[in-house]
Image (spheres, rainbow, N blue to C red):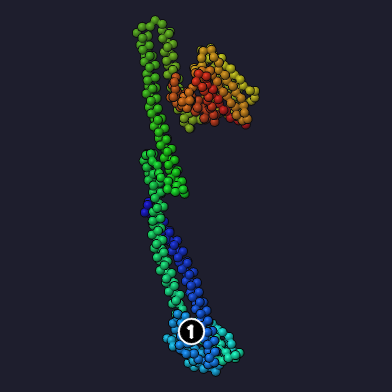
Amino acid sequence: MSSGITRKLVAYFVLVIISFAIIIGVVFSVSYQSQTKNTIKTSLIHESEMMVSLIESKGTLNLTESEVSNLLASLSLEDVQVWVVSDAGVITKLTKTSMGMGMMKDYSKLQTTTKTYIDQVLSGDQITSENIRGVFNQDTLTIGSPIKSGTTVIGALFVSASLKAISSISDSGVRLMIIATLIGILVASLMGYFLSRRFIKPVQAANQAIDTLASGNYELTLQKSSNDELGQLTDNLNILSQRLSKAKTQSDNLEKMRQNFISDITHELRTPVTIIRGLAEGVKDGLYEDTQGISEQIITETLGMQRLIKDLLELSKLEDPDFTFEKQAIELHDLLADTCRSAKPLLETKSLKLNCETQEGLWRIVADHQRLRQMLMIVLDNAVKFSPQGSSIDVKVTQDKDQVFLSIIDQGEGMTEDQLKTLFVRYHTTEGNGIGLALCKKIADRHNIKIDVKSTPHQGTSFTFIIPISN
Protein backbone atom coordinates (compact mmCIF):
# COMPACT_ATOMS: atom_id res chain seq x y z
CA MET A 1 0.00 0.00 0.00
CA SER A 2 2.84 2.33 0.89
CA SER A 3 4.60 2.36 -2.47
CA GLY A 4 1.34 2.40 -4.44
CA ILE A 5 -0.12 5.45 -2.72
CA THR A 6 3.27 7.17 -2.64
CA ARG A 7 3.70 6.67 -6.38
CA LYS A 8 0.21 7.99 -7.03
CA LEU A 9 0.74 11.06 -4.88
CA VAL A 10 4.09 11.80 -6.56
CA ALA A 11 2.56 11.23 -10.01
CA TYR A 12 -0.36 13.57 -9.26
CA PHE A 13 1.99 16.14 -7.77
CA VAL A 14 4.35 16.04 -10.78
CA LEU A 15 1.40 16.09 -13.19
CA VAL A 16 0.10 19.27 -11.57
CA ILE A 17 3.57 20.84 -11.65
CA ILE A 18 4.10 19.91 -15.32
CA SER A 19 0.66 21.21 -16.30
CA PHE A 20 1.33 24.42 -14.42
CA ALA A 21 4.80 24.70 -16.03
CA ILE A 22 3.39 24.18 -19.54
CA ILE A 23 0.74 26.84 -19.05
CA ILE A 24 3.22 29.28 -17.52
CA GLY A 25 5.79 28.41 -20.21
CA VAL A 26 3.42 29.09 -23.09
CA VAL A 27 2.19 32.34 -21.56
CA PHE A 28 5.75 33.39 -20.71
CA SER A 29 7.10 32.52 -24.18
CA VAL A 30 4.43 34.48 -25.99
CA SER A 31 4.68 37.40 -23.58
CA TYR A 32 8.49 37.37 -23.51
CA GLN A 33 8.80 37.27 -27.32
CA SER A 34 6.31 40.10 -27.67
CA GLN A 35 8.02 42.10 -24.92
CA THR A 36 11.46 41.52 -26.46
CA LYS A 37 10.28 42.64 -29.88
CA ASN A 38 8.60 45.74 -28.41
CA THR A 39 11.73 46.61 -26.43
CA ILE A 40 13.96 46.29 -29.51
CA LYS A 41 11.45 48.23 -31.57
CA THR A 42 11.54 51.06 -29.01
CA SER A 43 15.35 50.99 -29.04
CA LEU A 44 15.46 51.05 -32.84
CA ILE A 45 13.11 54.04 -32.93
CA HIS A 46 15.26 55.81 -30.35
CA GLU A 47 18.51 55.09 -32.24
CA SER A 48 16.88 56.05 -35.52
CA GLU A 49 15.85 59.41 -34.08
CA MET A 50 19.40 59.92 -32.75
CA MET A 51 20.85 59.25 -36.24
CA VAL A 52 18.34 61.57 -37.87
CA SER A 53 19.27 64.32 -35.41
CA LEU A 54 22.98 63.78 -36.13
CA ILE A 55 22.43 63.82 -39.92
CA GLU A 56 20.28 66.93 -39.70
CA SER A 57 22.94 68.66 -37.58
CA LYS A 58 25.65 67.77 -40.13
CA GLY A 59 23.56 68.96 -43.06
CA THR A 60 24.52 65.97 -45.21
CA LEU A 61 22.78 62.64 -45.90
CA ASN A 62 25.64 60.57 -44.62
CA LEU A 63 27.20 59.22 -41.42
CA THR A 64 30.59 57.67 -40.89
CA GLU A 65 30.81 53.98 -40.04
CA SER A 66 32.15 54.81 -36.57
CA GLU A 67 29.25 57.17 -35.90
CA VAL A 68 26.74 54.51 -36.87
CA SER A 69 28.57 51.85 -34.81
CA ASN A 70 28.59 54.05 -31.72
CA LEU A 71 24.87 54.66 -32.01
CA LEU A 72 24.06 50.97 -32.56
CA ALA A 73 26.37 49.67 -29.81
CA SER A 74 23.63 49.72 -27.16
CA LEU A 75 21.34 47.43 -29.18
CA SER A 76 23.44 44.26 -28.82
CA LEU A 77 22.03 43.06 -32.13
CA GLU A 78 23.76 41.54 -35.12
CA ASP A 79 22.83 42.31 -38.73
CA VAL A 80 21.42 45.80 -38.12
CA GLN A 81 21.22 47.57 -41.49
CA VAL A 82 21.14 51.38 -41.80
CA TRP A 83 20.52 53.03 -45.16
CA VAL A 84 19.48 56.43 -46.43
CA VAL A 85 17.29 57.37 -49.38
CA SER A 86 17.47 60.92 -50.67
CA ASP A 87 14.43 62.77 -51.93
CA ALA A 88 15.82 62.13 -55.41
CA GLY A 89 15.73 58.33 -54.85
CA VAL A 90 19.46 57.84 -54.30
CA ILE A 91 20.07 54.90 -51.93
CA THR A 92 23.11 54.91 -49.62
CA LYS A 93 24.03 51.98 -47.35
CA LEU A 94 25.64 53.15 -44.09
CA THR A 95 26.49 49.75 -42.53
CA LYS A 96 28.27 46.55 -43.48
CA THR A 97 26.32 43.48 -42.40
CA SER A 98 25.65 39.95 -43.58
CA MET A 99 22.25 41.07 -44.82
CA GLY A 100 22.39 41.75 -48.53
CA MET A 101 20.84 44.87 -50.01
CA GLY A 102 18.63 42.81 -52.26
CA MET A 103 16.66 45.06 -54.57
CA MET A 104 17.72 48.20 -52.66
CA LYS A 105 20.63 48.87 -55.00
CA ASP A 106 18.34 50.44 -57.57
CA TYR A 107 15.29 52.44 -56.58
CA SER A 108 13.66 51.82 -59.93
CA LYS A 109 13.79 48.07 -59.38
CA LEU A 110 12.21 48.13 -55.91
CA GLN A 111 8.96 46.33 -55.25
CA THR A 112 5.85 48.43 -55.19
CA THR A 113 5.35 47.80 -51.46
CA THR A 114 8.88 48.95 -50.67
CA LYS A 115 8.48 52.07 -52.82
CA THR A 116 5.26 52.82 -50.97
CA TYR A 117 7.06 52.69 -47.60
CA ILE A 118 9.88 54.94 -48.89
CA ASP A 119 7.43 57.43 -50.37
CA GLN A 120 5.48 57.46 -47.08
CA VAL A 121 8.61 58.36 -45.11
CA LEU A 122 9.67 60.96 -47.68
CA SER A 123 6.27 62.52 -47.22
CA GLY A 124 7.15 63.12 -43.55
CA ASP A 125 5.72 60.06 -41.73
CA GLN A 126 7.62 57.67 -39.49
CA ILE A 127 6.87 54.00 -40.19
CA THR A 128 7.43 50.66 -38.47
CA SER A 129 7.13 47.51 -40.56
CA GLU A 130 7.88 43.79 -40.49
CA ASN A 131 6.88 43.29 -44.13
CA ILE A 132 9.89 44.64 -46.07
CA ARG A 133 11.29 41.18 -46.84
CA GLY A 134 12.15 42.10 -50.41
CA VAL A 135 14.63 44.70 -49.23
CA PHE A 136 17.14 42.31 -47.60
CA ASN A 137 15.85 38.94 -48.80
CA GLN A 138 14.88 38.04 -45.19
CA ASP A 139 12.30 39.08 -42.59
CA THR A 140 13.24 42.31 -40.80
CA LEU A 141 11.90 44.82 -38.34
CA THR A 142 12.33 48.16 -40.12
CA ILE A 143 12.00 51.70 -38.75
CA GLY A 144 11.68 54.51 -41.31
CA SER A 145 12.22 58.13 -40.18
CA PRO A 146 12.12 61.31 -42.30
CA ILE A 147 15.23 63.56 -42.47
CA LYS A 148 14.39 67.23 -42.61
CA SER A 149 16.10 70.48 -43.32
CA GLY A 150 13.94 72.95 -41.53
CA THR A 151 10.44 71.86 -42.47
CA THR A 152 11.45 70.24 -45.77
CA VAL A 153 12.00 66.48 -46.01
CA ILE A 154 15.31 65.90 -47.74
CA GLY A 155 15.62 62.15 -47.24
CA ALA A 156 14.60 59.03 -45.36
CA LEU A 157 16.60 56.97 -42.84
CA PHE A 158 15.82 53.25 -42.52
CA VAL A 159 17.11 51.06 -39.68
CA SER A 160 16.42 47.34 -40.12
CA ALA A 161 17.08 44.46 -37.69
CA SER A 162 16.81 40.79 -38.58
CA LEU A 163 13.75 39.16 -37.00
CA LYS A 164 15.80 35.99 -36.77
CA ALA A 165 18.32 37.79 -34.56
CA ILE A 166 15.51 39.24 -32.46
CA SER A 167 13.96 35.78 -32.09
CA SER A 168 17.30 34.34 -31.01
CA ILE A 169 17.33 36.74 -28.04
CA SER A 170 13.83 35.74 -26.93
CA ASP A 171 14.60 32.07 -27.64
CA SER A 172 17.55 32.18 -25.27
CA GLY A 173 15.25 33.47 -22.53
CA VAL A 174 12.71 30.75 -23.27
CA ARG A 175 15.45 28.09 -23.21
CA LEU A 176 16.61 29.39 -19.85
CA MET A 177 13.07 29.20 -18.53
CA ILE A 178 12.66 25.63 -19.84
CA ILE A 179 15.89 24.57 -18.11
CA ALA A 180 14.78 26.25 -14.88
CA THR A 181 11.36 24.57 -15.19
CA LEU A 182 12.91 21.12 -15.68
CA ILE A 183 15.13 21.67 -12.66
CA GLY A 184 12.09 22.86 -10.72
CA ILE A 185 10.11 19.75 -11.75
CA LEU A 186 12.99 17.52 -10.64
CA VAL A 187 13.30 19.28 -7.28
CA ALA A 188 9.51 19.31 -6.85
CA SER A 189 9.35 15.59 -7.67
CA LEU A 190 11.97 14.78 -5.05
CA MET A 191 10.22 16.99 -2.50
CA GLY A 192 6.89 15.43 -3.46
CA TYR A 193 8.32 11.96 -2.94
CA PHE A 194 9.63 12.70 0.54
CA LEU A 195 6.54 14.70 1.52
CA SER A 196 4.30 11.91 0.22
CA ARG A 197 6.18 9.37 2.29
CA ARG A 198 5.81 11.61 5.31
CA PHE A 199 2.11 12.04 4.56
CA ILE A 200 1.57 8.30 4.14
CA LYS A 201 3.21 7.31 7.43
CA PRO A 202 0.08 7.98 9.56
CA VAL A 203 -2.02 6.04 7.02
CA GLN A 204 0.43 3.13 7.22
CA ALA A 205 0.30 3.26 11.00
CA ALA A 206 -3.52 3.32 10.89
CA ASN A 207 -3.56 0.33 8.53
CA GLN A 208 -1.21 -1.62 10.77
CA ALA A 209 -3.37 -0.70 13.76
CA ILE A 210 -6.48 -2.00 11.98
CA ASP A 211 -4.66 -5.26 11.19
CA THR A 212 -3.67 -5.51 14.85
CA LEU A 213 -7.26 -4.89 15.98
CA ALA A 214 -8.53 -7.44 13.46
CA SER A 215 -6.16 -10.03 14.93
CA GLY A 216 -7.78 -9.53 18.35
CA ASN A 217 -5.07 -7.44 20.00
CA TYR A 218 -6.74 -4.31 21.37
CA GLU A 219 -3.89 -3.07 23.56
CA LEU A 220 -2.40 -0.43 21.28
CA THR A 221 -2.02 3.34 21.24
CA LEU A 222 -1.13 5.40 18.16
CA GLN A 223 0.90 8.59 18.43
CA LYS A 224 -0.94 11.62 17.05
CA SER A 225 1.25 13.46 14.54
CA SER A 226 -1.07 16.31 13.48
CA ASN A 227 -4.37 18.03 14.22
CA ASP A 228 -5.90 17.46 10.78
CA GLU A 229 -8.10 14.64 9.46
CA LEU A 230 -5.25 12.14 9.88
CA GLY A 231 -4.94 13.22 13.49
CA GLN A 232 -8.68 12.67 13.93
CA LEU A 233 -8.29 9.21 12.37
CA THR A 234 -5.58 8.44 14.92
CA ASP A 235 -7.82 9.63 17.77
CA ASN A 236 -10.74 7.54 16.49
CA LEU A 237 -8.57 4.43 16.21
CA ASN A 238 -7.32 4.97 19.76
CA ILE A 239 -10.92 5.36 20.96
CA LEU A 240 -11.93 2.24 19.01
CA SER A 241 -9.03 0.33 20.54
CA GLN A 242 -10.05 1.39 24.04
CA ARG A 243 -13.69 0.47 23.47
CA LEU A 244 -12.81 -2.89 21.94
CA SER A 245 -10.47 -3.58 24.83
CA LYS A 246 -13.23 -2.67 27.28
CA ALA A 247 -15.75 -4.78 25.37
CA LYS A 248 -13.35 -7.72 25.35
CA THR A 249 -12.85 -7.37 29.08
CA GLN A 250 -16.61 -7.27 29.60
CA SER A 251 -17.05 -10.25 27.30
CA ASP A 252 -14.39 -12.19 29.18
CA ASN A 253 -16.04 -11.27 32.46
CA LEU A 254 -19.45 -12.31 31.14
CA GLU A 255 -18.07 -15.60 29.91
CA LYS A 256 -16.50 -16.17 33.28
CA MET A 257 -19.82 -15.31 34.94
CA ARG A 258 -21.61 -17.77 32.68
CA GLN A 259 -19.14 -20.50 33.48
CA ASN A 260 -19.53 -19.74 37.17
CA PHE A 261 -23.29 -19.78 36.80
CA ILE A 262 -23.22 -23.16 35.09
CA SER A 263 -21.16 -24.42 37.97
CA ASP A 264 -23.48 -22.78 40.52
CA ILE A 265 -26.69 -23.87 38.86
CA THR A 266 -25.36 -27.41 38.58
CA HIS A 267 -24.67 -27.33 42.28
CA GLU A 268 -28.07 -25.80 43.02
CA LEU A 269 -29.88 -28.46 41.02
CA ARG A 270 -27.76 -31.25 42.42
CA THR A 271 -28.80 -30.44 45.97
CA PRO A 272 -32.59 -30.56 45.52
CA VAL A 273 -32.30 -33.53 43.19
CA THR A 274 -30.23 -35.37 45.80
CA ILE A 275 -32.74 -34.46 48.50
CA ILE A 276 -35.68 -35.58 46.40
CA ARG A 277 -33.96 -38.83 45.50
CA GLY A 278 -33.09 -39.52 49.14
CA LEU A 279 -36.61 -38.80 50.29
CA ALA A 280 -38.12 -40.91 47.54
CA GLU A 281 -35.81 -43.83 48.34
CA GLY A 282 -36.65 -43.48 52.05
CA VAL A 283 -40.37 -43.62 51.30
CA LYS A 284 -39.80 -46.62 49.06
CA ASP A 285 -37.86 -48.41 51.78
CA GLY A 286 -40.49 -47.53 54.41
CA LEU A 287 -38.16 -45.37 56.49
CA TYR A 288 -40.68 -42.56 57.02
CA GLU A 289 -44.00 -42.86 58.78
CA ASP A 290 -45.10 -39.25 57.98
CA THR A 291 -45.26 -39.49 54.22
CA GLN A 292 -47.43 -36.34 54.05
CA GLY A 293 -44.58 -34.18 55.34
CA ILE A 294 -42.12 -35.89 53.02
CA SER A 295 -44.42 -35.22 50.07
CA GLU A 296 -44.65 -31.52 50.96
CA GLN A 297 -40.87 -31.27 51.18
CA ILE A 298 -40.48 -32.95 47.80
CA ILE A 299 -43.05 -30.56 46.31
CA THR A 300 -41.16 -27.57 47.79
CA GLU A 301 -37.89 -28.73 46.25
CA THR A 302 -39.47 -29.34 42.85
CA LEU A 303 -41.18 -25.95 42.91
CA GLY A 304 -37.80 -24.32 43.52
CA MET A 305 -36.29 -26.16 40.58
CA GLN A 306 -39.32 -25.37 38.45
CA ARG A 307 -39.02 -21.68 39.26
CA LEU A 308 -35.31 -21.68 38.43
CA ILE A 309 -35.90 -23.38 35.09
CA LYS A 310 -38.83 -21.10 34.32
CA ASP A 311 -36.80 -17.97 35.04
CA LEU A 312 -34.00 -19.18 32.77
CA LEU A 313 -36.45 -19.87 29.95
CA GLU A 314 -38.14 -16.50 30.42
CA LEU A 315 -34.83 -14.67 30.33
CA SER A 316 -33.80 -16.55 27.20
CA LYS A 317 -37.03 -15.52 25.48
CA LEU A 318 -36.69 -11.86 26.42
CA GLU A 319 -33.13 -11.75 25.09
CA ASP A 320 -34.32 -13.00 21.71
CA PRO A 321 -35.00 -9.90 19.51
CA ASP A 322 -37.50 -11.91 17.45
CA PHE A 323 -39.67 -12.67 20.49
CA THR A 324 -42.79 -10.48 20.36
CA PHE A 325 -45.03 -9.34 23.20
CA GLU A 326 -48.82 -9.41 23.05
CA LYS A 327 -49.20 -5.67 23.44
CA GLN A 328 -52.57 -3.98 23.60
CA ALA A 329 -54.17 -0.93 25.18
CA ILE A 330 -54.60 -1.51 28.92
CA GLU A 331 -55.58 0.68 31.87
CA LEU A 332 -52.85 1.10 34.48
CA HIS A 333 -55.28 1.07 37.44
CA ASP A 334 -56.53 -2.36 36.34
CA LEU A 335 -52.97 -3.65 36.06
CA LEU A 336 -52.11 -2.32 39.52
CA ALA A 337 -55.25 -3.83 41.09
CA ASP A 338 -54.52 -7.20 39.51
CA THR A 339 -50.92 -7.11 40.78
CA CYS A 340 -51.95 -6.17 44.33
CA ARG A 341 -54.44 -9.07 44.46
CA SER A 342 -51.74 -11.48 43.33
CA ALA A 343 -49.34 -10.14 45.97
CA LYS A 344 -51.69 -10.73 48.95
CA PRO A 345 -50.55 -14.32 49.60
CA LEU A 346 -46.93 -13.11 49.68
CA LEU A 347 -47.78 -10.34 52.15
CA GLU A 348 -49.59 -12.68 54.54
CA THR A 349 -46.50 -14.86 55.02
CA LYS A 350 -44.83 -11.99 56.93
CA SER A 351 -47.90 -10.05 58.10
CA LEU A 352 -47.02 -7.14 55.82
CA LYS A 353 -49.34 -4.26 54.94
CA LEU A 354 -49.64 -2.96 51.36
CA ASN A 355 -50.53 0.75 51.06
CA CYS A 356 -51.63 1.95 47.61
CA GLU A 357 -51.75 5.70 46.92
CA THR A 358 -52.81 6.66 43.41
CA GLN A 359 -54.06 9.78 41.70
CA GLU A 360 -57.39 9.76 39.95
CA GLY A 361 -57.37 9.60 36.20
CA LEU A 362 -57.41 7.31 33.20
CA TRP A 363 -53.94 6.07 32.35
CA ARG A 364 -53.94 4.01 29.20
CA ILE A 365 -50.76 2.34 28.05
CA VAL A 366 -49.90 -0.06 25.23
CA ALA A 367 -48.29 -3.08 26.85
CA ASP A 368 -48.36 -6.80 27.47
CA HIS A 369 -50.54 -7.08 30.58
CA GLN A 370 -49.05 -10.36 31.81
CA ARG A 371 -45.46 -9.20 31.29
CA LEU A 372 -45.96 -5.93 33.17
CA ARG A 373 -47.71 -7.82 35.96
CA GLN A 374 -44.71 -10.17 36.05
CA MET A 375 -42.36 -7.16 36.22
CA LEU A 376 -44.20 -5.63 39.18
CA MET A 377 -44.54 -8.98 40.96
CA ILE A 378 -40.77 -9.53 40.79
CA VAL A 379 -40.17 -6.23 42.61
CA LEU A 380 -42.98 -6.88 45.12
CA ASP A 381 -41.61 -10.37 45.78
CA ASN A 382 -38.18 -8.87 46.51
CA ALA A 383 -39.76 -6.23 48.72
CA VAL A 384 -41.56 -8.93 50.73
CA LYS A 385 -38.42 -11.04 50.95
CA PHE A 386 -36.30 -8.26 52.45
CA SER A 387 -38.95 -6.45 54.54
CA PRO A 388 -39.01 -7.03 58.31
CA GLN A 389 -41.96 -8.87 59.87
CA GLY A 390 -45.05 -6.68 60.29
CA SER A 391 -43.73 -3.71 58.26
CA SER A 392 -45.47 -2.06 55.32
CA ILE A 393 -44.88 -1.72 51.58
CA ASP A 394 -46.06 1.47 49.87
CA VAL A 395 -47.18 1.70 46.25
CA LYS A 396 -47.48 5.28 44.93
CA VAL A 397 -48.63 6.32 41.47
CA THR A 398 -48.43 9.91 40.18
CA GLN A 399 -48.64 11.55 36.77
CA ASP A 400 -46.43 14.25 35.26
CA LYS A 401 -47.44 15.30 31.74
CA ASP A 402 -47.22 12.21 29.51
CA GLN A 403 -45.53 9.95 32.07
CA VAL A 404 -46.71 7.94 35.06
CA PHE A 405 -44.38 7.34 38.01
CA LEU A 406 -45.14 4.04 39.79
CA SER A 407 -43.08 3.56 42.96
CA ILE A 408 -42.78 0.47 45.18
CA ILE A 409 -41.18 1.36 48.53
CA ASP A 410 -40.21 -1.09 51.25
CA GLN A 411 -38.65 -0.76 54.71
CA GLY A 412 -36.18 -3.57 54.24
CA GLU A 413 -32.45 -3.97 54.56
CA GLY A 414 -31.57 -1.60 51.72
CA MET A 415 -28.54 -1.88 49.44
CA THR A 416 -25.04 -0.46 49.14
CA GLU A 417 -23.74 1.52 46.16
CA ASP A 418 -21.86 -1.53 44.87
CA GLN A 419 -25.01 -3.64 45.04
CA LEU A 420 -26.98 -1.00 43.15
CA LYS A 421 -24.44 -1.02 40.31
CA THR A 422 -25.01 -4.73 39.64
CA LEU A 423 -28.67 -4.83 40.61
CA PHE A 424 -29.98 -5.80 37.17
CA VAL A 425 -27.02 -7.96 36.17
CA ARG A 426 -28.02 -11.59 36.05
CA TYR A 427 -26.57 -13.97 38.63
CA HIS A 428 -25.48 -11.08 40.87
CA THR A 429 -27.46 -11.96 43.97
CA THR A 430 -27.31 -12.51 47.66
CA GLU A 431 -30.39 -14.72 47.77
CA GLY A 432 -32.30 -16.65 45.11
CA ASN A 433 -31.00 -17.41 41.63
CA GLY A 434 -30.26 -13.80 40.65
CA ILE A 435 -32.45 -13.84 37.53
CA GLY A 436 -35.61 -12.06 38.71
CA LEU A 437 -34.43 -8.45 38.47
CA ALA A 438 -32.67 -9.19 35.18
CA LEU A 439 -36.07 -10.35 33.88
CA CYS A 440 -37.67 -7.21 35.31
CA LYS A 441 -35.19 -4.97 33.47
CA LYS A 442 -35.66 -6.81 30.16
CA ILE A 443 -39.44 -6.45 30.36
CA ALA A 444 -39.12 -2.73 31.18
CA ASP A 445 -36.71 -2.13 28.29
CA ARG A 446 -39.03 -3.84 25.81
CA HIS A 447 -41.82 -1.45 26.94
CA ASN A 448 -39.64 1.72 26.94
CA ILE A 449 -40.06 1.91 30.71
CA LYS A 450 -37.25 3.42 32.77
CA ILE A 451 -36.42 2.15 36.25
CA ASP A 452 -35.01 4.43 38.94
CA VAL A 453 -33.76 2.69 42.10
CA LYS A 454 -32.88 4.48 45.32
CA SER A 455 -31.68 2.61 48.39
CA THR A 456 -29.90 3.22 51.68
CA PRO A 457 -28.57 0.41 53.86
CA HIS A 458 -30.99 -0.42 56.73
CA GLN A 459 -33.48 2.21 55.49
CA GLY A 460 -35.29 0.45 52.69
CA THR A 461 -35.42 0.56 48.90
CA SER A 462 -37.54 2.45 46.36
CA PHE A 463 -38.19 1.16 42.81
CA THR A 464 -39.75 3.79 40.53
CA PHE A 465 -41.07 2.79 37.09
CA ILE A 466 -41.35 5.70 34.65
CA ILE A 467 -44.10 4.59 32.25
CA PRO A 468 -45.03 6.53 29.07
CA ILE A 469 -48.78 7.12 28.60
CA SER A 470 -50.37 6.47 25.19
CA ASN A 471 -52.20 9.31 23.45
Residue 103 in sight from this viewpoint: no
Residue 267 position in % (x across, y down): 37, 20
Residue at disc 1, secondary structure = helix
**Lateral position of residue 204 relative to residue 82, left or right:** left
Query: Residue 301, relative to residue 316: is it above or below?
Result: above
> Pointer 1: what residue?
71
Query: Residue 435, relative to residue 84: is it above or below?
Result: above
Extreme residue in the front direction: 57
Residue 417 position in % (x across, y down): 48, 25
Name which residue lies at 37% across and 42% down: 212
Name which residue lies at 59% across and 19% down: 356
Query: Residue 389, relative to residue 252: is it above or below?
Result: above
- Residue 15, quarter of picture: bottom left
Name which residue lies at 54% across and 29% down: 450
Residue 198 position in % (x across, y down): 40, 53
**Label 1 CA crowd tier, 10 Å (few <14, some 14–19, many 20+):** some
Extreme residue in the top direction: 289
Q: Nearer the viewer, residue 318 or 353?
A: 353
Q: Nearer the viewer, residue 471 or 21?
A: 21
Residue 279 position in % (x across, y down): 38, 11
